[in-house]
Image: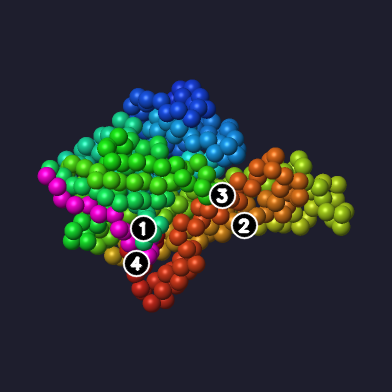
Amino acid sequence: MTDNKSQMEDMEQPDREICHLSSVISHSDEPKASPSPPRIRSDAHAIQIAQWLAETLAEESDKRDRERQLPYQEIDAFSRSGLWGITVPRAYGGAEVSVSTLAEVISLISEADSSIGQIPQNHFFMLEVVRWNGTEEQKQFFFQKVLQGARFGNALSERRSKTVAEYETRIIPADGGYIVRGEKFYSTGAFFADWIVVVARDPDDYLRVAFVPKDTRGLKVVDDWSSFGQRTTGSGTTILQDVFVPAEYVMPYQKSFDEPSPLGPLAQIIHAAVELGLARAAIKETITWIRNRARPWIDSGRESAAEDPLTIYQIGELHIALHAAEAVLDRSGKAVDQVMAQPNPSTLGAASVAVAEAKVLTTEVALAATNKLFELSGTQSTLSAWNLDRYWRNARTHTLHDPVRWKPFIIGNFVLNETLPPRHGAI
């Protein structure tokens, strides 16, 4: 009886919560203060909330992309939903959902708006940094902050270094803490964050991570993201000019890769989930166009595009690819859960390979679906009034986060030669 009551509450609660969340979104560019979000209770609850929220976020996604409107109120609603705290461990008051559930939540939001789906990627990544590297005091502090609604933004990558794994930003010990100096780019989510998380090298060239409150003096976020895709992620420049960070806000970062940890595959599975959501959205759009606007080819002998046998065949192929990607993504989430439960070289290797397989499939289906949208919908679909190119632009941009061409090599080397994948955030 208790279990049935709990299941009914899980089914009814999202309806009430999402009505409140919808009222938060006023389609304004100005941020609002947020109360503490509700606590997500379970994996099923997280997915239900994400499904409801996605419907609201989809409403003006076209307009936001077309006009490059940064989604302040949409991110506030996303945060108020409680979904940004779903990976906080149960011991600290969170739901600690499975990685497969996290991936599905991101896929659902990305299907509605892939820019919004990408924004919390580094938030969840940095939550894992806290779990893996933080002291007990730091875990208590930051996990509670997140459950109260705090958001982490990204200041990791630098575009002037030789490779993405090299950093010129420096963190120098000072009285009571550290001084951080440097410049970052691809700062996804920094505009919407309460804390901007910075990776930098100390005087011993050891990588540390600093959690910097957004209003800290010397910290500046510049809105200079000009990519043709993922236009509203706020992924511009972060400038750090002698920024002081208290010692309690700094923890090791390099440790995450010196030791077997789930950080690499966790980062990658979220990227794969964004691409899966993009593919779902593009395929749905394609089906709508074929049914309602596209014309049959003259040689088909059919009355409608939906009856064209070659169109039917290609829609079938897309669905096979989509469902394969969904299945492998879910499988890879279970492999990452295994690393979290038993972190060792064997579980990490298996998880990295599983997520790499998912990343290959989600990249392929996202690009294929966003291309087929135009091929099967016809020339009218390219008119700027429809803005359908946003699907391709977003897929092409997001799939460049790391070279998918390296994935089959890493997978094959693991299977054939038992060579463990490298340890970094892109595998």
Whether label 2 touches label 4, CB < 8 Å: no
Numbered disc 4: secondary structure: loop
First along the sequence among labels 4 and 3: 3
Amino acid under disc 1 = Gly
Q: Which amino acid, by three-letter code, is at mark 4?
A: Pro
Q: Which mark is residue 228?
A: 3
**Whether label 2 touches label 1, CB < 8 Å:** no
Q: CA distance from mark 3 to mark 2?
A: 18 Å
Q: Which residue is mark 2?
A: 368
- Which residue is identified by label 1? 425
Give the magenta-colored segment's residue range. 162-175
Q: Which mark is residue 422?
A: 4
SS at circle 1: loop
Q: Main secondary structure of the magenta part?
A: loop
Q: Do labels 4 and 3 touch, CB within 8 Å?
A: no
Gap in Å between the C-alphas at discs 4 and 3? 31 Å
What's the residue at 27%, 37% (across, down)?
Answer: 216
- Farthest left residue in view: 175
Q: Secondary structure at mark 3?
A: loop
Mark 3 vs 2: CB contact within 8 A: no
The three-letter code of the residue at mark 3 reads: Phe
User: For the N terminus, which image quadrant?
Assistant: top left
Q: Of the residues under marks 2 and 4, which one precedes in the sequence?
A: 2
Residue 86 location, quadrant: top left
- In front of the other: 5 or 258: 258
Q: Earlier in the sequence, mark 3 or mark 2?
A: 3
